[in-house]
Image (tube, coloured by chain):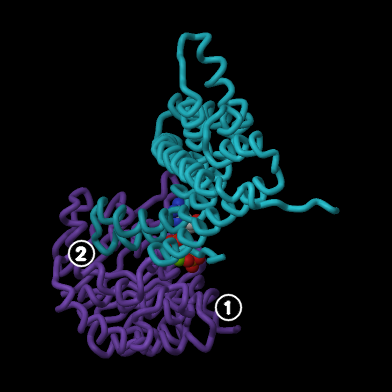
Amino acid sequence: MAHLELDNISAAYGKLRVLDGIDISVGSGETVGLIGPSGSGKSTILRVLTGLLKPEAGQVRVGGEPINFDKPAEIRRLRDRAAIVFQQYNLFQNLTVLENVMIAPTKVRGRKPRDVRPEAEHLLAKVGLADKINSYPDQLSGGQQQRVAIARGLCLKPEILLLDEVTAALDPELVSEVLDTIRGLAEDGMTMLIVSHEMGFIREISARVAFMADGKVVELGSPAQIFDAPEKERTRDFVGKILRH
Amino acid sequence: MDYTFQYGQVWPYVPYLLKGAWLSLQIAFLAFCGGMLIGTACAAVKTFGSGWMRHGVNAYVVFFVNTPQLVQIYFLYFALPDMGIFLSSYMAVLLGMTLNAGAYLTEIQRAGFESRRQSEMEAAEVLGFSRWQQIRYVILPHVAKVLFPPLSNHYILMTLGTSMAAIFGVEELTGRAFNINSETFRSLEVFSIVAVIYVVVTLAASVLLALFGRFAFRAKMRVV
Ligand SMILES: Nc1ncnc2c1ncn2[C@@H]1O[C@H](COP(=O)(O)OP(=O)(O)OP(=O)(O)O)[C@@H](O)[C@H]1O
Ligand SMILES: [Mg+2]
C-alpha cells in the first residue's frame, strides 16, 4: 500500500490555479523525485502536503487514510507524520541549533527535555554538527543551516520527509554534505518526496521520478525512463536542456 | 583666554545637582513607560486595526512627530488653562514628553511588528506550534531583538530631552543648574559639571542597555 498518495489534487493561490489534477503516490520507504521547471508547482505540492495550502479538489491519503483539510485535528495529524525541510531552511534565528531541534518535540509534543536532548544531539552528530549545537543559525554556513533544518524535521520522528530544493541555496562544496545526509536517510528506509534540481542526485536516489510542468504531472517513471528514454516531448525538452549544462 | 575656573564655589552644589539628575531620570523613565504603553497600543492599531482607527493614530503620530516638543509642552502648560485644565509644570512636562514619546514609539514599534518573518512562522506552523506558541517562541523574541536597540536609543534621547523641563521651572538637572548659576554666576563651572553628569548618566545607561540587549535578546548593539 502506498504510504503517501495525492489523488487528483488541485490547488490555487487566489484565482491562480497552480496544481491541476496531480496524482503521485510514494510507497513506504520509497524515494520519489520531483523535477520540473521553475513555477511548475513543485513547492506548492509540498505546501499542500504540510497543510499550508488547502487543496481545492482531490484527496491526500497517508497510510490509506484520507486527510480532511477542514479539520485542524487532521492537519495536525498530517504534520505529525510528515516533516518538511524548506528551501530557505526557515530556522528560528533566536534559538540555538540545539534549541531549534528540540523545541517542537518538547513544546509541541510535550516530551521531557532530558529525554529529547540525547536524541537531538545524536541527530546533529549524524548530520555532522556535533560541535555546533550551541551556535545560532546566523553563525552557520548555508549547508550547516540546511542540515540543522533536516535534523529539526527528523527529531519529530516523521514517517515521511518532504525536501524542497535542499541544495539549491548551497555552494557546490556544501551540496555533497547535504546529499550524503539524505542518502543515509534513504538507506534507513525513510519515505521521501524530494524536489531538486540536482538531476544526478535525483537519478541516483529516487526509485521513481515525476516530471511536472504547468501544475500537471507530465510523466512519472523510473529514473532510467525519465532521464534516458522519456516518452513525452515535454520531458525530453526539459531533461535535454538540464543535462546539457 | 585668561578665565580662571573657580570650582570651589560650585562644588558644594554637586549633591544638589545630583538630586536634580535623579529627577531627570525619573521624568525620562516615567515618560518612556507611558510612551511605551501608548506606542504599543497605537502600533497594534496601525498593524491590525480597522480603517478609521488607523487614521486616528496616524493623525496623532503626524502631529506629534512634526511639531517641536517644546511647543507641545508650552501648549499643555499655557494653553490648557484657558480651557480650564490646570497642570503643574512637572505634570505638563511629563504629559508632553509622554505624548511625544508615544508618537515616536508608535513608529518604531510598528516597524518591528512588520519585520516578523513569514518563513519562520510557516516553519512553526508546520512543526505544530499553536498560535500562542508562535507568538511566544517566534514573534516576540524576534520583535524584542529588532526593537530593543532603537527603543534604547530613544530612551537615551529622552533622558537628555528632560532638560527642557528647566524652561518651565522644574528643578531637574538643568533647572537646578539655572538656579546655581543665578546665585553664583559661575556659568562655565556649573554647566561643565552638568555636562559631565549628563555624559556619565547617558553613557552608563547606554552601556547597561547594550549589555542587557546583547544578553537578553542577542540584539546587535555596540557597548560604548
Ligand atoms: N504565495 C504565493 N502566492 C501567489 N502565487 C504563488 C505563491 N507561491 C507560488 N505562487 C505561484 O505558483 C506557481 C507555482 O509555484 P511553486 O513555488 O510551486 O513553483 P516551483 O515549481 O516550486 O518553482 P521553483 O522551481 O522556482 O521553486 C508559480 O506560478 C508561482 O508564481
Ligand atoms: Mg519551489
Which disc is residue A107 wearing? 2
Q: Is residue A228 found left or right of A23 in the rendered image?
A: right
Q: Is residue A46 above or below residue A146?
A: above
Q: Residue B224: percent from the left, percent from the top?
A: 57, 65
At label 2, the amino acid type is: Lys
Name the subunit of mark 1: A
Residue A40 at least partly seen: no
Mark 2 surroundings within 10 Å by alpha-carbon count, few (fewer than 14), some (14 through 19), many (20 or more):
some
Q: Chain ID for label 2?
A: A
Image chain in cyan: B
Query: Which image quadrant for residue B202?
Result: bottom right
The image shows residue B206 at horizontal and vertical percentages of 52, 58
Camera-side residue: B56 or B134? Answer: B56
The residue under the point 31% across, 89% down is: A125
Residue shown at 53% from the left, 86% from the top: A172
Q: Quadrant of the C terminus of chain A?
A: bottom right
The residue positioned farthest toward the right in the image shown: B1
CA–CA distance between discs 1 and 2? Answer: 46 Å
Rendered purple, the chain in question is A
In the structure shown, which secondary structural element does the residue marked by tag 2 occupy? helix
In the picture as drawn, the residue positioned furthest to the front comes out as B8
Nearer the observer, A229 or B46: B46
* Element under disc 1: helix
Q: Which residue is mark 1?
A: A241
Q: Are marks 1 and 2 in contact (CB under 8 Å)?
A: no
Q: Is residue A189 rendered to the left or right of residue A207?
A: left
Q: Which mark is residue B196?
A: none
* Mark 1, other Cα within 10 Å: few <14 / some 14–19 / many ≥20: few
Q: Amino acid at mark 1?
A: Lys
